[in-house]
């Protein structure tokens, strides 16, 4: 999955578990996560994950949406 843009829509408990697994196995620059309250997952930004609250914007140009 290297080099692919992966988006996780609605990054709750399950989404965060998936995100953590992907962060270990792929290029973090290409990870995007959304949540209604993006402040709840802002801590992932320091790891290179792009955090948004707009699902439509998040899936633009994505290779894989979860």
Image (cartoon, helix red, strand yellow):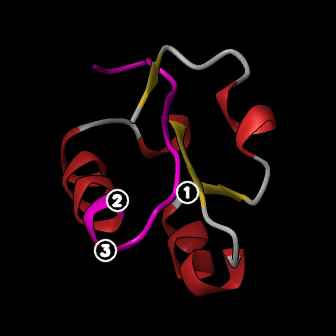
Q: Is residue 26 magenta?
A: no
Q: Is residue 13 left or right of residue 38?
A: left
Badge 3 is on which residue?
Answer: 13
Residue, disc 2: 15
Look at the numbered disc 1 and give the secondary structure of its residue: loop
13 displayed left or right of 59: left
Q: CA distance from mark 3 to mark 1?
A: 19 Å
x, y percent for residue 53: 76, 60
Measuring 20% from the left and 52% from the top, which residue is drawn there? 24
x 48%, y 65%: residue: 47
Q: Nearer the viewer, mark 1 or mark 2?
A: 2
Taking the image as shown, residue 12 lies to the left or right of residue 60, namely left
Q: Earlier in the sequence, mark 3 or mark 1?
A: 3
* Badge 1: residue crowd in 10 Å (few <14, some 14–19, many ≥20): some
- Mark 1 = which residue? 48
Residue 10's tag is none
Contact (Cβ within 8 Å) of mark 1 with mark 2? no
| Residue 59 spot, x, y in % from top left | 66, 28
- Going from N to C along the chain, the mark reached first, 1 or 2, is 2
- Mark 2 vs 3: CB contact within 8 A: yes
Quadrant in the picture for the N terminus: top left
Q: Which residues are magenta?
A: 1-15
What x and y, as percent, mark residue 33?
Answer: 55, 53
Residue 24 vertical position relative to residue 16 in the rendered view, above or below: above
Residue 13 x %, y %: 31, 74
Whether tag 3 and tag 1 are in contact, CB under 8 A, the answer is no
Q: Quadrant of residue 39?
A: bottom right
Q: Secondary structure at mark 3?
A: helix
Main SS, magenta residues: loop
């Amino acid at each position: 999955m290297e080099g692919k843009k992966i988006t996780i829509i609605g990054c709750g408990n399950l989404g965060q578990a998936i995100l953590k697994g992907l962060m270990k196995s792929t290029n973090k620059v290409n990870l995007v996560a959304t949540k209604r309250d993006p402040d709840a997952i802002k801590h992932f930004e320091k790891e290179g994950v792009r955090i948004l609250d707009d699902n439509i914007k998040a899936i633009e140009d994505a290779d894989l949406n979860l």
